[in-house]
Structures are given as C-alpha cells and as structure tokens.
Image: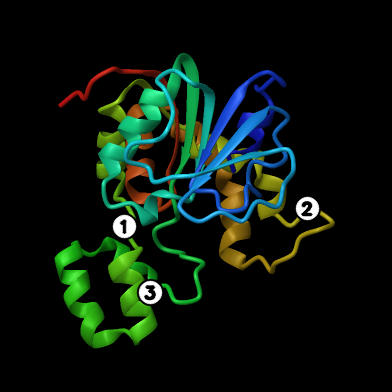
Amino acid sequence: MLRRDIDSRVVPDDRVFDPGSKHGNKAAHIDANVVAVNIELQPIHKGLAYVRADGFPLPFQADTFDYVSCCQVFEYIPQTRAFVAEISRVLKPEGAAFLDLPNRLFPDRPHSPPGYYSLLPRPLGLRLAQSLLDSDQERYYRDYVYNLSPVIARRAVHAHFESVEYVTPRQKVAYRPIFLGDVDDLVYTLGKGTKVFAKLLLLITLLTRFPPAGWLFELLYPHAAYECREPSRGCKR
C-alpha cells in the first residue's frame, strides 16, 4: 500500500532505497533510480540496481537516498531499532521513509504459525511452538517471525525520526475500491468482514483524526504503516 505514496512524489532523478527486496517487484514500477538490497538476490528487472548486503550496516554513505520504501520486511529482523537507525542514516534530511509493517494477524506465508502467535510474548510463543506447531511452522516462527506490536513499532521509528505519521487509515481509504470489490482485475475473494470494514472506512478515518480515537485504532489494528521524515542523527531514548 506504499505504492501510491511513492508514485505521487518521486521524480526520475530521485534515488529510492528498497530494502529486503529479493526481486525488486515492489519497487520496479517506480520511475526513479531504485536500489534493491537483500541478502539473496534474483535480479529480474533491468531498470533496478541490485546490491547484496545485510542491513547492519548498510553499504551506503549517509544522506544517500531521497526515499525509502520498506514493505513487509520487519518481520524478518529481530534488531528493529538498529534497522530503523540505518534507514534514518542513509535517508537525506529532506527525504521520506515509508515503512509498511506486516499484518500481525494475517500472515501470508505457507508455513506461518497462526496469527495469534504474534500477540504472545516471544519466550512464551517459542515454548508453545515447540509443542503445538508442526516442524515447518515452528522453524519459521523461531527464525523469521518478529512481528512488532504497535507500541514497539512506534518507539522504534520515533527513536530515529523527528516526524512520524501513522498513515494506515489514509492508505486504506486509497484502496477502498479494492476492499469493496469495485475493480475488474481482483484476483482474490473478499470476505464479508472486509466489505463491511470498507463501508465503514470513511467514518473510521474521520474518527482517527482525533488523538484518542487515532491512538486506539493504531493500538488495536494489526497493520501499521508510517511515513517518517526528518531523520535524527542519534538515538532518542
């Protein structure tokens, strides 16, 4: 859902950083100089620059990129703050980072554990996984699932950015026609709950403009996305 935010702002000379992108599919459409970084790469898009690297540290100088598009990556990274710190470091002072966190209750990987595991304290989740999950699910949870709670996510981004906007409601409104099924090329079946949510979305978005309602929505809704600006050169406690 970061796609519309990025598309509406970049110009061809901008440099865009796409971390955790093996193929570059999520950023290939962007009309700019896109750099895709991952530990494993499958370069299939000619217009992208691919860099094999870990995230600690990133192999770029400070103030390198105009935009960062980080989508569905944080669940693989246990060192959340260190990763956000590197994103902040390589982003230009006037740039923007769009961070889209995974939906904690609806993982889409074939071997993912049930969604409620993301709500458990990790030590308890690890113990239960050994006895309740099959071997593939247990390994996936142990090695890859680091879904963030809203509190931890917000603390991480606020530690390294002066300006942080919770943009999930805005993004949901942009994709409201899809949730309602009002598109011709929809490739999956929408449940009744999704359609009801979409019909109430405009009202929900209006309510989230008021701080108490906005904080409550951010705390309870399982999918968080942030637009981060003004990178701080140093960690705030």
Query: Which numbered disc covers residue 182?
Result: 2
Q: Nearer the viewer, residue 174 or 229?
A: 229
**SS class of the residue under badge 1?**
loop
Q: Which residue is rendered at x = 82% and y = 58% of the image?
A: 185
190, above or below 42, in the image: below
- Amino acid carrying mark 3 in the image: Pro
* Any part of residue 202 in sight: no
Left or right of residue 148: residue 9: right
Callouts 3 and 1 close, C-beta under 8 Å: no
Q: Which residue is mark 1?
A: 146
Label disc, if present, on residue 114 of the rendered structure: 3
Residue 217: assigned label: none
> In the depicted view, which residue is nearer to us: 11 or 171?
11
Of the two numbered discs 3 and 2 on the same chain, state the one appearing first in sequence.
Answer: 3
Q: Is residue 129 above or below residue 98?
A: below
- Say which amino acid is labelled 2: Asp
Which sits earlier in the primary sequence, circle 2 or circle 1? 1
Instruction: Pick the quarter of the image with the C terminus.
Output: top left
From the viewer's perspective, tell me whether residue 39 is left or right of residue 33. left
Q: Quadrant of the N terminus?
A: top right
Residue type (three-letter) at the residue carrying disc 1: Tyr
Q: Secondary structure at mark 2?
A: loop
Q: Of circles 2 and 1, which is in front?
A: 1
